[in-house]
Each structure stands twice: as C-alpha cells, then as structure tokens.
Image: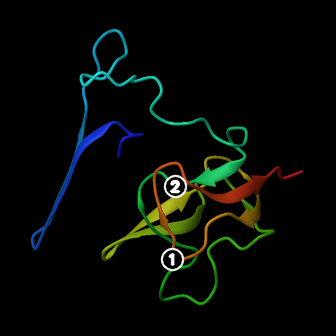
Amino acid sequence: MEQARLNRLELTRPDSRLRLVRRAADTAGHAADGASAGAAMPGPATPPGENVTARGAGIFLAQHPLRDAPLAPPGRRIARGDVVGLLGIDVLYLPVTASRGGVIGERLAEPGDLVGYGTALFRLLDAS
C-alpha cells in the first residue's frame, strides 16, 4: 500500500463495497504526507513489453476453473489482446490479456498466487 501511495483500503460485505484511497500529491510531486510521489514503485526488472503483467490484484489462475487446459501454455503463439490467464477476486474472474503478440515463454507466477498490479505472470517471447 505504501508503494502505491494508498492511504486506505476498505472492503465491506455482504452487498460488497471496495474503496481504495490514494494520497494526493502537491504540485512539487510530493505526496501530501511528505513522501515522494515520484518514487512510489520500483522499475521493472526486465525491459517493458517482455512480460505479461497483471493489471489488477487477485488470485492468479492459468486456466478457467471449469476447463482442463491452461489458457496459454508455454510455446503458444498469441496476439495482442488474447486472454492468457485470469485474476480471481471472490467469485469474479478478470481476464489477463497480452499487451502485444508473441510466444508464451516461462510462467512466472504459480496458479493460486496472490498477485498485485504489475506482477509479471508470463515471459513473452518475440514471435520470430
């Protein structure tokens, strides 16, 4: 939460409510509480576009619970926008899509892992 400059995370049920509150930054790029707004998240360990990453938080699933086969096994050629995994949030499954075409390489997260925004899920190789 600190890295994302979140001030509050609120979950309520039974009818559901999720509320994320982010600290405001002043014009100098500093968060209102004095933390630097520019140093919130470390840079990626690999060059951009080399991994398929999570665009949200949830439980990573390599296959739909009602299917036997993974959505994107290593070696599969994919196109931009193809669904390669799922993020499970309670009973909701959000698609993880590829930001570019290529070939699925190594899976970097294990099914059942709790992942956050930006977590590398698959290595994406060039389609050459």
Q: Nearer the viewer, mark 2 or mark 1?
A: 1
* Count of marks overlaid on the render: 2
The residue depicted at 68 percent of the width and 51 percent of the height is: 51
Quadrant of the image occupied by residue 47: top right
Q: Amino acid at mark 2?
A: Ala
Label 1 crowd bin: few (<14), some (14–19), many (20+), radius 10 Å: few
Tell me whether the residue at label 2 lies in contact with that at label 1, contact meaning CB atoms closer than 8 angstroms. Answer: no
Horizontal and vertical percent for residue 75?
81, 68
Horizontal and vertical percent for residue 72?
67, 70
Residue 22 is left or right of residue 45, and the answer is left
Q: Amino acid at mark 1?
A: Gly
Read off the residue under disc 1: 112
Under tag 2, what secondary structure?
A: loop
Name the foreground residue: 15 vs 102.
Answer: 15
The residue depicted at 49 percent of the width and 68 percent of the height is: 86
Read off the residue under disc 2: 54
The residues tagged by marks 2 and 1 sit, at their Cα atoms, a distance apart of: 14 Å
Name the foreground residue: 8 vs 49.
Answer: 8
Quadrant of the image occupied by residue 35: top left
Horizontal and vertical percent for residue 112?
51, 77
Q: Is residue 18 above or below residue 85?
A: above
Of callouts 2 and 1, which one flags the residue occurring earlier in the amino acid sequence?
Answer: 2
Residue 5 is left or right of residue 7, and the answer is right
Name the foreground residue: 72 vs 106.
Answer: 106
The residue depicted at 68 percent of the width and 43 percent of the height is: 45
Residue 76 is left or right of residue 86, and the answer is right
Label 2 crowd bin: few (<14), some (14–19), many (20+), radius 10 Å: many
Name the foreground residue: 17 vs 78.
Answer: 17
